[in-house]
Image (cartoon, coloured by chain):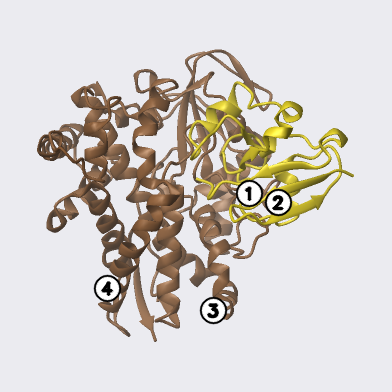
């Protein structure tokens, strides 16, 4: 079971261990990680699960996909090259140890 | 037999093909829910061949609405093809399309939305919070205790209008003009607000003139103010907007910041009267305001629908929608979809995922002011709970005659300390 590390804006790290196959948004919501809302339930349609992928992991997660993910990220706050919607990152064994930084607030 | 039961049988007695949920009368007596319940069960993607607004499709289930709302390439919001309400006239003034970013598709939509979104960004909301709370306190402290008065006019309208005047830096003493223009924008003749389309055009022109004056005062300022008009006047994207587009965007921001929050504020009081056990839960634990606020916004669903126009043939829920068809996403029905929301008719203030509702829409047109709306409701209830033990609703509220704005004209209440 892979472990995902969420870094809060104040630097605090919350590590959760979850089943492969769910999204990094679901992993956060199910484990009550603050700062990830996931209002739309995983359809890349609200941009309230905005995260910054740690640069060391971006090759494995990939950057934001064309289409809905990029369209919606367009309206989030302080979007960077490593910005993703956590609902579009599928947790796999390969992502064991993944580091995701959270923005100050979700718009 | 209770009124609800009688209405349920009335809704079931109509042939399916004759069901017309756009009839504004069904919203006045709040019986439209029975018709939606039948459509969700028997014909979730329903074609109505004949209505006052022409033929249209009704999308009534949560997941089908989500599919349409997130497919902006097929389902257009563009004013030129029909806009975002079932009534084509709503996006027009004097026959001209009133374009604003809610009635545009990408990429125009994206560019204009980005101009106004900073005013409701989290960082600016923190600045606004203090002002909102002070005004809220003043309004609540001025209310009579133990006497019957209208909550809609004295609290919901007053508060949202003050907020809007602040966002526009609009002359504060003239702020009720904003309320009027908001009502006029979404009204149709016969609603009790306007008598004719001509009257609507005339009043909207007065609105345009008033804002054009403010624009002219602010466009040449060396230090642009932190208000919405200055933002539009100074951004390279919007400073050369055609007049109809300027008016369109102003009206969008007025309606978006006014009707919706106003009616959720009234709806929150009504809901907690209808579900007294939930109110007791709230009083015992004020921290539940956090989840109560989005739940109230779901329960109220202050905008009953959004409309799209199909740009291509496309299947939704097993039905083939044809290019050019009018498609109405009934958020009010999706928010009562028992397959997605448990016990959807009930207000349950501690739901596990209360933000999973359709009231703000989803996709690129998702409400830009959603966090501001939630913040206003949150502060309202924090300040109410600090003062009053109960807000008693004295009789059934009088509802707005509209299939778009789901709201209240009048709701008498009595405050108890």
Q: Is residue B402 left or right of residue B316?
A: left
Q: Give SS at disc 4.
A: helix
The residue under label 3 is B283
Quarter of the image for residue B62 reads top right
Q: Secondary structure at mark 1?
A: loop
Tag of residue B138: 4
**Distance of mark 2 from mark 4, alpha carbons?**
38 Å
Crowding at label 3, few (<14), some or many (≥20) Cα neighbours within 10 Å? some
The answer to whether marks 2 and 1 sit on the same chain is: yes
Tell me the crowding category of disc 1: few under 14, some 14 to 19, or many 20 or more residues within 10 angstroms, Cα based.
many
Mark 2 falls within which chain? Answer: A
Does residue B267 appear in this view? yes
Answer yes or no: are tags 3 and 4 on the same subunit.
Answer: yes
Q: Residue furthest front?
A: A56
Distance from the alpha carbon under mark 2 to that under mark 1: 7 Å
Q: Which is more foreground, mark 3 or mark 4?
A: 4
Q: Please give left or right for residue A68 compared with residue B192 in the image.
A: right
- Does residue B52 show up? no
Q: Quadrant of residue B6?
A: bottom right
The residue mark sitting in front, 2 or 3, is 2
Q: Earlier in the sequence, mark 2 or mark 1?
A: 2
Real-space Cα distance between discs 2 and 3? 27 Å
Which residue is identified by label 2?
A29
The chain carrying label 4 is: B
Question: Residue drawn 61% across and 64% down?
Answer: B348
Determine if marks 2 and 3 fall on one subunit: no
Chain painted brown: B
Chain yellow in the figure, letter = A
Q: CA distance from mark 3 to mark 1?
A: 27 Å
Q: Whole-percent x and y of residue B14?
A: 56, 39
CB-based contact (under 8 Å), mark 3 and mark 1: no
């Amino acid at each position: 079971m892979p472990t995902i590390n969420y870094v809060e804006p104040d630097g605090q790290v919350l590590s959760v261990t979850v089943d492969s196959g769910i999204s990094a948004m679901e992993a956060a919501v199910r484990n009550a990680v603050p700062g990830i809302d996931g209002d739309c339930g995983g359809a890349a349609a609200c941009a309230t699960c905005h995260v910054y992928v740690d640069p060391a992991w971006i090759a494995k997660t990939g950057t934001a996909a064309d289409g809905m993910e990029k369209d919606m990220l367009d309206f989030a706050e302080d979007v960077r090259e490593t910005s993703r919607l956590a609902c579009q990152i599928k947790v796999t064994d390969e992502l064991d140890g993944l580091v995701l930084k959270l923005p100050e607030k979700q718009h | 037999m209770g009124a609800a039961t009688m209405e349920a049988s009335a809704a079931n007695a109509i042939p399916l093909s004759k069901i017309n949920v756009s009839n504004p009368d069904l919203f006045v007596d709040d019986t439209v829910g029975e018709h939606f319940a039948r459509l969700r069960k028997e014909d979730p993607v329903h074609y109505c061949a004949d209505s006052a607004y022409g033929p249209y499709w009704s999308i009534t289930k949560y997941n089908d609405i989500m599919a349409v709302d997130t497919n902006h390439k097929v389902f257009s919001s563009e004013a030129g093809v029909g806009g975002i309400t079932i009534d084509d006239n709503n996006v027009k003034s004097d026959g001209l399309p009133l374009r604003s970013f809610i009635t545009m598709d990408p990429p125009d939509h994206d560019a204009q939305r980005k101009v106004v979104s900073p005013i409701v960004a989290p960082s600016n909301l923190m600045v606004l919070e203090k002002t909102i709370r002070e005004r809220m306190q003043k309004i609540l402290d001025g209310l009579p205790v133990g006497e019957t008065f209208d909550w809609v006019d004295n609290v919901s309208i007053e508060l949202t209008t003050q907020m809007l005047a602040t966002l526009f830096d609009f002359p504060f003493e003239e702020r009720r003009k904003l309320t009027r223009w908001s009502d006029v924008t979404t009204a149709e003749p016969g609603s009790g607000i306007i008598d004719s389309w001509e009257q609507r055009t005339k009043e909207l022109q007065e609105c345009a003139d008033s804002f054009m004056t403010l624009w002219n005062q602010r466009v040449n300022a060396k230090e642009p103010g932190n208000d919405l008009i200055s933002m539009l006047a100074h951004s390279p994207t919007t400073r050369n907007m055609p007049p109809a587009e300027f008016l369109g965007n102003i009206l969008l921001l007025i309606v978006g910041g006014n009707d919706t929050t106003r009616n959720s504020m009234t709806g929150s009081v009504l809901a907690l009267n209808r579900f007294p056990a939930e109110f007791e839960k709230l009083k015992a634990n004020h921290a539940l305001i956090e989840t109560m606020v989005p739940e109230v916004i779901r329960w109220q669903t202050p905008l009953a629908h959004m409309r799209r126009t199909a740009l291509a043939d496309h299947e939704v829920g097993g039905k083939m929608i044809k290019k050019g068809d009018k498609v109405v996403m009934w958020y009010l029905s999706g928010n009562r979809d028992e397959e997605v929301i448990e016990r959807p008719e009930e207000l349950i203030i501690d739901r596990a995922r209360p933000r999973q509702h359709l009231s703000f829409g989803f996709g690129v047109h998702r409400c830009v002011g959603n966090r501001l709306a939630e913040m206003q409701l949150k502060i309202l209830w924090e300040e109410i709970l600090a003062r009053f033990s109960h807000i008693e609703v004295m009789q059934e509220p009088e509802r707005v005659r509209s299939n778009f704005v789901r709201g209240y004209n009048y709701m008498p209440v009595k405050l108890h300390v």
